[in-house]
Image (cartoon, grey):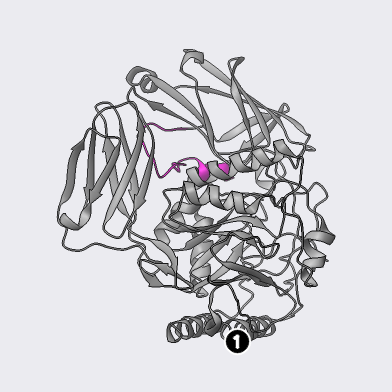
Amino acid sequence: MNNYENWQELYPRPMLKRQSFLNLNGEWKLNTTPIFIPFPPQSSLSQYHQEVQEHLTYIKEFQLPEHFSSQNDHILLHFGAVDQIADVYLNNQYLGNHTGGYLPFSFDITNFLQDDMNTIRVEVVDTLSHTYPYGKQRKKRGGMWYTPVSGIWQTVWIEAIPQQAIHNIKITPSLSSIHIDIDSDASQFYISIPLENKIFQQTYTSKEIDIDLSHETESLHLWTPDNPYLYTIIIKTDTDCIESYFALRTIEIKNRKIYLNHSPIFLHGVLDQGYFNDGIFLPEKPQEFIADILKMKELGFNIIRKHIKIEPEIFYYACDKYGMLVMQDMVNNGNYNWFLDTALPNKGILYRPDKFPGQKERKQIFEKHMLETLNHLYNHPCIISYTIFNEGWGQFDADKMYKICKAYDSTRFYDATSGWFHQKESDVDSLHIYFRTKELSTKMNKPLFLSECGGYTRPIQNHLFKEDAHYGYGQTDSEEALTDCIIKLYEDMVLTSIPNGLCGCIYTQLSDVEDEINGLYTYDRQICKVNKKRMMNISQKIFECFQKNL
């Protein structure tokens, strides 16, 4: 099996599924040389062995199945993500432009299709401009900066939609009901929800719909990491039908605690960069997303902080399905300064201007991307929180960005300034603590959240990106030594701080990434570097300590 075939049959948008689906992954041409999509050209899985240029021209020929055009009125061409600036053509006709690199986009190609063979051309420019979101990418990779990714790096696919199609849905849950906003030209909607002993069915003539499930079934299932119960929902118009899902769950902050479904919860988490040794931004198989989630649950974690990268939607579906909470970072743009953004803060010097003139375009792009991220991921119950700015990277007007996010989506909590350079507005008092373990406390009337810590290294020979890789925050040389360091961190800094209001802790990190060898797993995910039983035991101690201090 070719590597891309692992991505061939998987429907890329689980929140809005239709029967029509034509996957265009597989062999394309990049600058006249074969490449295998969806993998980026810098990855070994793409089988692209040329130097990656700043200007990339992708070509793909395809023929549309007959049933697409005979039964539907509109044909859409979807891109999961293209980094950074993409101009798209079909049969030499210009479809449009997209900028960014981390979010999906689509074009209506109905009027540009030919009866026989069709040719897609995607012209990409990727200079790794810091005007646009770029995350942890750097041309001269090394240390905490990684190999850049260019061009197409997610699934490309086609679907057919009818007139009066359902373009999007927005589902807001409570513990017993859901509110649905439907984006559609239709005037009537038929909704069905399979329940345990019956099927809820109702017809609505409004695009804003409230459904109280407490009157429809004797037992309601709330979504939690231990019981990630998902309800299927089918929405039809006279011409269209989509399948989606939702969960009954709430997240809120009160009394200096984080509440899931009205119950206080300790967020015991791990930082996840979302990098893979063979596909960089993608694993070889989508199932590896599930494997990562289950590996972290096996160590006792209940939340992943998805660090400065937005994943394919199937990752969030896997978290929804298998019960992993997610704290999603916004992807930074703007310049980074090691002295101001890292060195001084780690010495306790935490002042940096938050308001400064200029860079109007860059700020507008960040705000636009931030809101598009909230919209794109809104329906996923696993996502309970967002990080807006991390350690000052590209930070500006943090209080304003917090208020914009909160106005758009008040159903999650926000870490506006993760680590340092705090302003007035944020739902948590967020700290990054490396190189030391100490009891923590806060004078703020909000939960104390240790949003990064740990990062101890352990090299595993024959599983390193580079044989001399060494980057991390404290050296160990065995499973026992690494596990000892982590448990000491939890005992000295987490357990002692829970009585002072600590409600969450994020350990750095899930796996090694290139030069960084501070993962709980090796970069290839083949070796767990810590003792699983001891990690689970300390996790139980943390949860028990939290319950005793409520």
For the N terminus, which image quadrant? top right
Whether residue 1 is visible: no
Rendered image quadrant of residue 259:
bottom left
Judging depth in this view, the residue of 191 and 47 nearest the camera is 191
Does the magenta segment cover residue 212?
no
Image vertical order of residue 439 relative to residue 51, above or below: below
Instruction: Please give the range of residues in magenta.
Output: 3-22
As drawn, 31 above or below 413: above
Q: For mark 1, does the 10 Å Cα neighbourhood hold few (<14), some (14 to 19), or many (20 or more) residues?
A: some
Q: Position of residue 349 (x, y in %)?
A: 79, 69
Residue 332, x across and y down, in percent:
67, 49
The image quadrant of residue 441 is: bottom right
Q: Residue 271, relative to residue 309: is it above or below?
A: below
* In this picture, residue 13 sits left or right of residue 55: left
Q: Which residue is mark 1?
A: 491
Residue at x 72%, y 44% (from the top left corner): 42
Q: Residue at x 41, y 56 (%)?
A: 381
